[in-house]
Amino acid sequence: MTDVTPVANNFIRQIVLDERAAGKHGGRVVTRFPPEPNGYLHLGHGKSICLNFGIAREFGGVCHLRFDDTNPSKEDIEYVEAIKADVQWLGFEWDVLRHASDYFEVFYRCAEKLIRDGKAFVCDLSAEQVREYRGTLTEPGRNSPWRDRSVEENLDLFRRMRAGEFADGAKTLRARIAMASGNINLRDPALYRIRKVSHQNTGDAWCIYPMYDYAHSLSDAVEGITHSLCTLEFEDHRPLYDWCIQHVDLPHHPELVQPLREAGLTATVSTPRQIEFARGNLDYTVMSKRKLMALVQDGLVAGWDDPRMPTLSGARRRGFPPAAIRTFWERAGVTKQNSVIEFSVLEGCVREVLDATAPRRFAVLDPLKLTITNLPEDHSESLTFPNHPKNEAFGTRAVAFSRDLLIERDDFFEVPPKGFHRLVPGGEVRLRGVGIVKCTEVEKDAGGNVTGVCCTLDADTRQGLPGAERKVKGTIHWVSASHALRAEVRLYDRLFTGADPDDTSDGKTYEDHLNPNSLRVVTGYLEASLAQAEPETAVQFERLGFFVADRRDHAAGKPVFNRTVTLRDSFAKPAR
Ligand code: ATP
Ligand code: MG
């Protein structure tokens, strides 16, 4: 990824710029992010959050967080809290927090207005009959036999629906639009249904609940939203969105929002404009709440914030910096073309941010003993290392050095592969910050496995001394065996093996595509300074990758680090 970031391709930003130039909306920008609290947010939601909050921020506007809680049975307060935390973690703050359910009384009044205007009717058709009457893409629908009820009868029935006189599914309130419309969404869609369930926010106050398109468009208008940004699947719903806005006509009917004023809520109504953009998709990832929920419920991951999950809370726990996610979506741009972005592009953004922000540390994850035989047994020294190779502002730290060290097992080979430039019997390698050592002896167990190596140190080759100029090809890192901090280190890999886990063509489900090696837990030996790391501290273990102290399980005395990402994109692409 280059440093020269072009102005990202974002057609919505361009629309706002053009509108401002033309003096529309008085230059005001009010957006909203409208999650349904029926699961945790994923990286795709991150795109919508960055877009809505980003546009508002860029143009001096405001963005609302609105819980679309119109579907009582699937929603939960746990999700509400998780969503708020995720939005803030991503770096955004809402100006107004609302729930669609705050507007239930307004929606109800709007429905009575539509009835009085002859624009809505109570229908007794069952769900199955409604489907029958609806027609198909090629055939028009048929009018419901209840379509021509009088205003009085409709008002009476609708009030009795609200009062709980009818069973679930016995009646619906439907818009009276056009059963012959080429757009099925306009064939007298339901506006209200009866559901006798309690609601997380309104309790048992209601037994009729508004349908999505109706509630969504009116919520936008009630809140004074100027730009209602949503994903492409709502394109066909836009005529219904506009129909609701137009026929309810809030700007000319202030009495409809009176309940809000009484509740002490502001109501600066607007005529919002819906604009659709393409969803963000990533390969090697599923991004449907239903599927993510199944992974959690089936115990295939350790929870919504499992570091392998593509949820925002999973990314956080994995150690992805919020800035990397913002940069990623900024670069991805906003268009109307559906596409799938490689997960490695996101990982590239993560590396870029962490390279600049994460201090360097030494850690050995697969240890091999290295003894420096020409040092006294009690040799103990404190060496100073810079915390960042490119940024002096990170300062320095002391690292304990002694005679008995640990190095990575694969930094030594008895019979080295071709091109191997690190330690071999009789060979030399530079120990970071120490000098050049020569391998004089290899220790083995009865089974012939290498258990340690003995070396001599050429003391003249330490940095600052004349011998430091002497060249050897490899440099390796180390930790002092007696000073090292033992830690649980979780090595994460991708959750799915296939680029398209949703591909079911060979009769598989996405759960069949799970990577059995997506988590490997090892004991790591870390330099002692990490004992003080707070949860969520990001570091680079030199030569190994970026790691983060686990947000939940890491504690003083029980260090737990997660691998966020390796240093290079080592992900093998399947042969094509
Ligand atoms: P899912 O299909 O996973 O259940 P959803 O779209 O139903 O997701 P919502 O809670 O309704 O989930 O989403 C809140 C907002 O985030 C909506 O405006 C939705 O369009 C947007 N959004 C959801 N997924 C994506 C995505 N992959 N890319 C961009 N925006 C998204
Ligand atoms: Mg949705």
Image: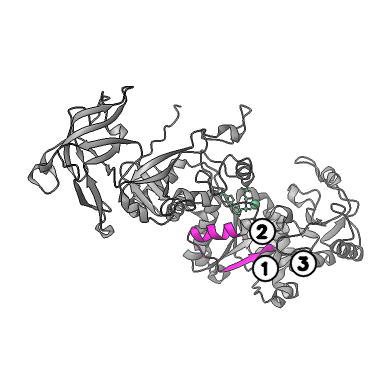
Q: Residues within 10 Å of mark 1 (few under 14, many from 20)?
A: many
Density class for disc 2 (Cα within 10 Å; few <14, some 14-19, many ≥20) is many
Work out how far the residue at label 2 is from the one at label 3, CA to CA, in angstroms: 18 Å
Say few, some or many: other residues with alpha carbon within 10 Å of mark 3 (under 14 / 14 to 19 / 20 or more).
many
Residue that badge 3 annotates: 110
Q: Position of residue 452 (x, y in %)?
A: 27, 32
Which label's residue is closer to the chain start, 2 or 1?
Answer: 2
Q: Amino acid at mark 3?
A: Cys
449 or 121, nearer to the observer: 449
Residue nearer the viewer, 231 or 361: 361
Q: Which span is picked out in magenta?
A: 81-100
Alpha carbon separation for disc pair 2 and 1: 14 Å
The foreground one among 501 and 439 is: 439
Name the quadrant containing residue 229: bottom right
- Asked if the stretch drawn in magenta spans residue 207, the answer is no
Q: Is the CB atom of the residue marked by disc 1 within 8 angstroms of ligand 1's nearest atom?
A: no
**Residue at image coords 41%, 43%:** 489
Q: For marks 2 and 3, give the one nearer the viewer.
A: 2
Pointer 2 with pointer 1, Cβ within 8 A? no
Q: Secondary structure at mark 1?
A: helix
Does residue 99 show up magenta in the picture? yes
Give the residue type that dot 1 points to. Answer: Val
Left or right: 83 as drawn, with respect to 329:
right
Return the x and y of residue 554 as percentages of the image width and height.
45, 52
The amino acid sitting under disc 2 is Asp
Instruction: Note whether ligand 1 is within 8 Å of mark 2.
Output: yes
Across and down, in percent, residue 332 comes to: 47, 48
Question: Image point 70% across, 63% down: which residue?
Answer: 201
Report the disc number at residue 222.
Answer: 1
The residue identified by callout 2 is 68
